[in-house]
Amino acid sequence: MVEDDAADFCSLGPLFEQKDAVPPNPAVLVLGGSTFMGRETVQALLDLPARVCVVNRGRSYWGTNDPSGGRAARVSADRRDAELFAARLDVVTERLGGRWALVA
């Protein structure tokens, strides 16, 4: 099991804040949503509204600036370490308690 380190799981709260909406807002996992098209994708999903979890795939400095303004959950998982990357996604998916409606 992967340890819960604040540097790796920056904020998971937004995944649960809208979970009780009726009907529940869809949960979306975005791989690389901090720059370029990913940032715009995250903003569009949040505007739906959707519960969004952004996976930073390797840039350690990303955790210092949250483009979503705290509206998306954030996880850091280095894509160069496949085992660790998969383990981090497993932890987030387990905490979600269900399936992702979309992986983008």
Image (cartoon, rainbow, N blue to C red):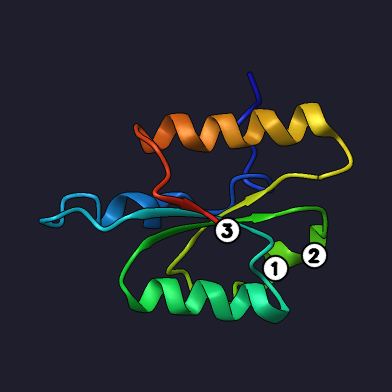
Instruction: State the mark number for residue 103.
Output: none
- State which tag comes first along the sequence, 1 or 3: 1
Residue farthest to the right? Answer: 80
Q: Which residue is mark 3?
A: 104
Secondary structure at numbered mark 1: helix
**How far across and down, in percent of the image, does residue 63 sit?**
69, 62
Query: How would you rate the neighbour count of disc 2 (Cα within 10 Å): few for under 14, some for 14-19, many for 20 or more?
Result: few
Query: How would you rate the neighbour count of disc 3 (Cα within 10 Å): few for under 14, some for 14-19, many for 20 or more?
Result: few
| Alpha carbon distance from label 1 to label 2 | 6 Å
Contact (Cβ within 8 Å) of mark 1 with mark 2: yes
| Alpha carbon distance from label 1 to label 3 | 23 Å
- State which tag comes first along the sequence, 3 or 2: 2
Instruction: State the mark number for residue 61.
Output: 2
Q: Which residue is mark 1?
A: 64
Task: Say which quadrant the N terminus sits in.
Answer: top right
Secondary structure at numbered mark 2: helix
Q: Left or right: where does residue 27 sit relative to residue 23?
A: right
**Which image quadrant for residue 14?**
bottom left
Task: Give the residue drawn at x 67%, y 45%.
Answer: 8
Task: Give the residue drawn at x 70%, y 68%.
Answer: 64
Q: Left or right: where does residue 8 sit relative to residue 26?
A: right
Contact (Cβ within 8 Å) of mark 3 with mark 2: no
Q: Amino acid at mark 3?
A: Ala
| Alpha carbon distance from label 3 to label 2 | 22 Å
**How far across and down, in percent of the image, does residue 89 sit?**
60, 37
Q: Amino acid at mark 1?
A: Thr
Query: How would you rate the neighbour count of disc 1 (Cα within 10 Å): few for under 14, some for 14-19, many for 20 or more?
Result: few
Given residues 75 and 6, the one toward you in this image is 75
